[in-house]
Image: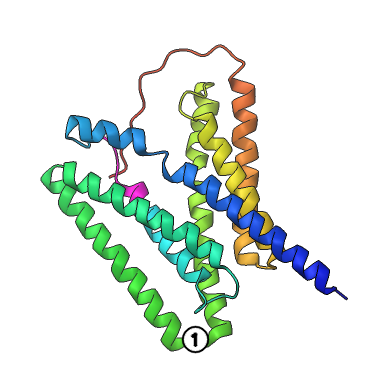
Amino acid sequence: MISSVQLVAYSVFKDAAGVAGNIFAFGLFVSPVPTFRRIIRNGSTEEFSGLPYIYTLLNCLICAWYGSPFVSIDNTLIVTVNSIGAIFQLVYISLFIANAERMRKMKMLGLLAAVFVTFAFLVIVSLRVFDFASRQIFVGFLSCASLISMFASPLFIIRLVIRTKSVEYMPFYLSLASFLMSVSFFAYGMLNWDAFIYVPNGIGVLLGITQLGLYSYYSKRPSEAHAPLIVSYS
């Protein structure tokens, strides 16, 4: 039987893990700043893609909704990190739209509208169709799938590092921040007995270890010079 002291200890460690996750996530949220400095300086989005910010915005909205008291219990720090993330993505998307050519501007506006319509539909359906327990499972699976898809995005970079035998396109501090954030929220989810949090973040931990391992291996090898990589998926 768990004593009151143990319960307090669990709560303290859980909150500490959540706060740490929020701090490390902030490092990820500000990572696109150099890209947008270049976009603003040149007055053009060039070949940069706005899709990652659209995807991340939708992910943050879904996860923030899962963390809200309408869906799950005692997940305030999930709400805070994803609300801050959503604000950052909205700022990036606004800057992208402001500096994009007309066709890309219209496409981004359409995608942004689709994100808000999708999220509004999710909120309405989850509130009207499901009771509290079923709602947590429904939204939890959606947030879990969304997080796993986001954590799977580094697979492209991992494949690129192995192909080019260079860590030029995999910034160390970005990989480290992603790994530490995943570790923090994995611990948070475990201490809160929430599989919808610790499962996707556990996958994030494994991918983070892979990235850091590749960085350690390939950063010690001489690499050939490569042309700057600016990939557009739009």
Locate residue 170, reporting x and y percent.
49, 30
When asked about the image quadrant of residue 33, the answer is top left
Residue 171 sits above or below residue 50 on the image:
above
Locate residue 126, reporting x and y percent.
45, 80
Residue beneath the point at 68% across and 67% down = 192
Residue beneath the point at 51% across and 41% down = 154
Q: Which quarter of the rendering shows the C terminus? A: top left
Q: Which quarter of the rendering shows the N terminus? A: bottom right
Q: Residues within 10 Å of mark 1 (few under 14, many from 20)?
A: few
Q: How many marks can you see?
A: 1
Q: Amino acid at mark 1?
A: Phe
Residue beneath the point at 32% across and 34% down = 35
Front-most of 189 and 115? 189
Residue beneath the point at 48% across and 38% down = 156
Locate residue 193, reporting x and y percent.
70, 68
**Coloration mode:** rainbow
Q: Secondary structure at mark 1?
A: loop
**Residue 185 placement, left or right of 36:** right
Residue 101 sits above or below residue 16 on the image:
above
**Residue 125 placement, left or right of 220:** left
Residue 49 sits above or below residue 187 on the image:
above
* Residue range highlighted in magenta: 47-53
Regarding residue 59, the answer to whether it shows in the image is: no
Locate residue 103, reporting x and y percent.
13, 47
Instruction: Residue 49: say if magenta.
Output: yes
Residue 213 sits above or below residue 141 on the image:
above
Instruction: Residue 113: say if magenta.
Output: no
**Residue ID for mark 1:** 130
Regarding residue 199, the answer to whether it shows in the image is: yes
**The furthest residue to the left:** 102
When asked about the image quadrant of residue 208, the answer is top right
